[in-house]
Image (cartoon, helix red, strand yellow):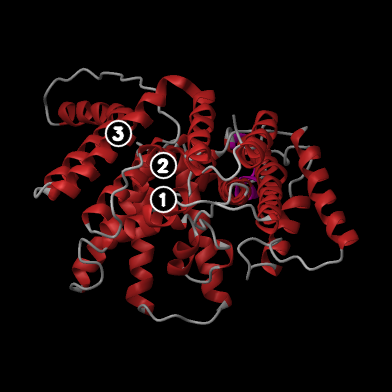
Amino acid sequence: MTFNSIAYAFFLPIVFLIYWYILGKRLRAQNIFLLAASYFFYSCWDWRFLGLIIFTTATTYLSALMMEKSEHKKLWLTINIVANLAVLFTFKYLGFFVENTCVLLNYIGFRADSITVNIILPIGISFYTLQAISYSIDVFRRQIAPTHDYVAFSTYIAFFPQLVAGPIERSVNLLPQILKPRTWDYSVAVDGMRQILWGLFKKVAVADLCGIYADRILSDVDYYNGSSVLLALVLFCCQIYGDFSGYSDIAIGSAKLFGIRLSSNFRYPYFASTISEYWRRWHISLMTWLRDYVYIPLGGSRTSNARTYLNIGMVFILSGLWHGAAWTYIVWGMFWAIFFIAERIVFGKKEYKFNLLRYCITMLVVLASFVIFRAPSLTHAGNYISHIFTPALLSLPTGLTPIMTVIPMFIIEYVGRCNEYPLQNIRFQAPLRWLIYAALTYSIIFAVDEASSQFIYFQF
């Protein structure tokens, strides 16, 4: 069940009606129902992996209680982190590790047969694992008291709007909202519906249409000229932004329907004029997680310049590894580390007003990074780049151009960039407001006939 599916269009209203109009103000019943709905939502992908979520929930819950009672708090923290990372490593990185170990052993002269480890990657595991680990660290740091309400804690780990692809929530933000009574607020629900509509538009009418062109060209670049390959890479940048930020908008909007506010995950990153600003706007929940639980504990920027740059490099390489077990993601992380550090060396940490030249440079770096990110291998990435400079072979593929939705999306986002999402404080009179809603809805319905795909970040 995906956010852009007919199943979710039925699932969400049913859960909403039962949650508010049948369970009413009974907090315990609401949390039990939310947990059941979240487990059902996840089981629609593969019910067999429910055991992993339950394992993560149970170990994290119990370790926090032991930290509360025991003098050996660090021991219980370590046990929980190791247990959760072991599960993540087994399902996400074991095959990659085994394959590359065999290659290394053969390279240095030892005979090693490559062993193929085919393990299905449980959807959402990278997200809820980090969420669980952050809770145990927050308890250890005494930033939050361990909860004794197992149902509420289970709901915190498995809350269905953000279970599959974030935002990666912090216990200090989400858990208190689950533990306290929630009241119906019509204006918040309307706000949530607007955000869902905008997220669906970005996913279906922008990302999926861009994906048609990008996938068709990049799947066989030998048949297209350099400008076509370059356009395909630009469209992939639009695709991944519309796809992931669209998911985040739908997730945040869905949570609002239940009286819960999730953290912002995007703040118009393609309007950032510097590399550091871009990373304060893109996938905010992951980068702040790495900042608070990796970068700062390593010393952050409070150490020497050399150590600071090393810490930055580790954060970006871990970010690449978090995205997937492939060399492309590791190189992608190293790529961003180099440019992030270079910008800090040249310009320092001082904030500057918008500068067109720096904006163009930042966007070129973003485009280059997505060449590596999109490619199945480093060889393919090099092939993409080399083909940008080849002479014309064939024209662009025929069909509906995504430009008719990409340009309006960025115009609307630029106009509404001071809000959480562009439609949040729309102040038009009712007829014009509903005309905008109708136009967005029509675009979504029309685009569904062209393409419909899963969210890109589901694979991470």
Residue receiving disc 1: 175
* Above-or-below relation of 41 to 457: above
Which quadrant, please, contains the C terminus?
Answer: top left
The kind of residue on which mark 3 rests is: Ala
Q: Are marks 1 and 2 in contact (CB under 8 Å)?
A: yes
Drawn side of residue 373 relative to residue 23, left or right: left
3 or 1: tag closer to the N-terminus? 3
Which quadrant of the figure has residue 290? bottom left
Residue receiving disc 2: 152
Closer to the camera in the image, 422 or 226: 422
Closer to the camera in the image, 439 or 170: 170
> How many numbered marks appear?
3
**Disc 1 from disc 2: Cα separation:** 7 Å
- What residue occupies the far left of the structure in this picture? 71
Residue receiving disc 3: 58
The kind of residue on which mark 2 rests is: Ala
Q: Secondary structure at mark 3?
A: helix
- What residue occupies the far right of the structure in this picture? 431
The reply to whether the magenta stretch includes residue 273 is: no
Which quadrant, please, contains the N terminus?
Answer: top right
Q: Residues within 10 Å of mark 2 (few under 14, many from 20)?
A: many
Q: Secondary structure at mark 1?
A: helix
- Highlighted range, magenta: 221-231
2 or 3: tag closer to the N-terminus? 3
Label the magenta part by its dominant secondary structure: helix
